[in-house]
Image (cartoon, helix red, strand yellow):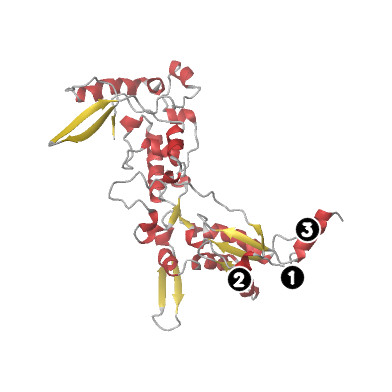
Amino acid sequence: MALLTKTPFSFLRNAVISTSIRTISTTKQLNIKEIREHKDGNKLIVEGVTVPSPRMELLVKSEKVAEEVLSVEKPTCYLCKLDLDVKHTDVLILSQFVRSDGCMLPRRVTGLCRRQQKKVSKMVTMAQKAGLMINLTPSYCKKDPKLRYAYKKFNTYFDEKTIFMKRIPDQRDKFKR
Amino acid sequence: MSAAKRVQQWATFARTWHIFDCKWQDPYQSANVIKKYLMGLHKPIYHPMNDCGDVVVCINSREIALRGDEWRKRAYFHHTGYPGGASWTLAWELHNKDPTMIIKKAVYKSMKGNLQRRHTMERLFIYPGEEIPDDVMQNVSNQIRQQRLVPQRLDHIPEDEVQQYPKVMEYPSDYVLK
């Protein structure tokens, strides 16, 4: 299903580049892997386990995808096709693009177009600064926005219009003469 | 006069008490709304010489939200009157000292500076938390609608709801879960 939504170019690149880099592999290639570590007495066992993707059944599919794959003129990413109005408070969507330590996934993993990748990554930053995804943070984080330093502990909201602005206008500018 | 009209008439001439929850609200945007109720601008009988303003009780003023980097960019000016007595306090420093001050100053600033302003401000009650005295709470009969939606934190959403939420992104086929 994910392959359908991808553009032919990124599919090709994915197949050629990402597999050719990892030339040595002991497990079956082209499957999601999870690295598990556990201790057996004195030995530390690290194994890569092949697991089915946890979000396979829940994946949303755009209705237009099938038509647009046939008439490929200008390749667009799946988020453009879904045409969602995502806000920085929509943490259920934004958390899908994030690793477990709250770091934004790179474009070769998310498969977004340049503009959407920039938009989503900025919105992830906004959500993190507002303390809305505090459970997806590095392990040394105190996991409570109220315990943060100085001005960071107070509630902050953001305006999505400012994402692609070169200079963010000050709210006090309108009082200037 | 129907019963509904009659009650509307009473409410217009009475001093109604409104409650406003400041949680995740921008004080400068909500000040423009609070101002209307304080001055009585929402009433058809409004006139500047007519004392028809209502009372507004603001709760959770500690939980207000400022936009972007305003907490460390907005400064509040004060001058003692002596030479070298000027001081600039940043918004987050002011909020640390007194969590009711920002919303109070925002409402004060949103109104026109005339002799009535100080008396209108007397009708504004601000409380940093959810607890209000009972003699204030028993007067309240209306709630002012919030301007912004209160966002929900990801760790406050139940675990299975996060798991079952429709997914937009699928991992590439050779992705290592982290």
Which residue appears at 54% of the width and 67% of the height? Answer: B104
* Residue type marked 3: Gln
Mark 3, Cα crowd under 10 Å, few <14 / some 14-19 / many 20+, is few
Q: Tell which residue pokes out farthest to the right in this image.
A: B1
- Contact flag, marks 1 and 3 (Cβ < 8 Å): no
On the same chain, marks 1 and 3? The answer is yes
**In-front residue for pair B21/A12:** B21
* Residue type marked 2: Met
Point out residue A71 in the picture as x, y percentages from the top left corner.
45, 17
Instruction: Indicate whether A110 appears above or below A148.
Output: above
Point out residue B27 in the picture as x, y percentages from the top left corner.
52, 60
| Residue A142 seen by the camera | yes
Residue that numbered label 3 is attached to:
B8
Q: Is residue B119 left or right of residue B2?
A: left
Mark carried by residue B50: 1
Query: Where on the picture, by quarter, is residue A59?
Result: top left
Residue that numbered label 2 is attached to:
B121
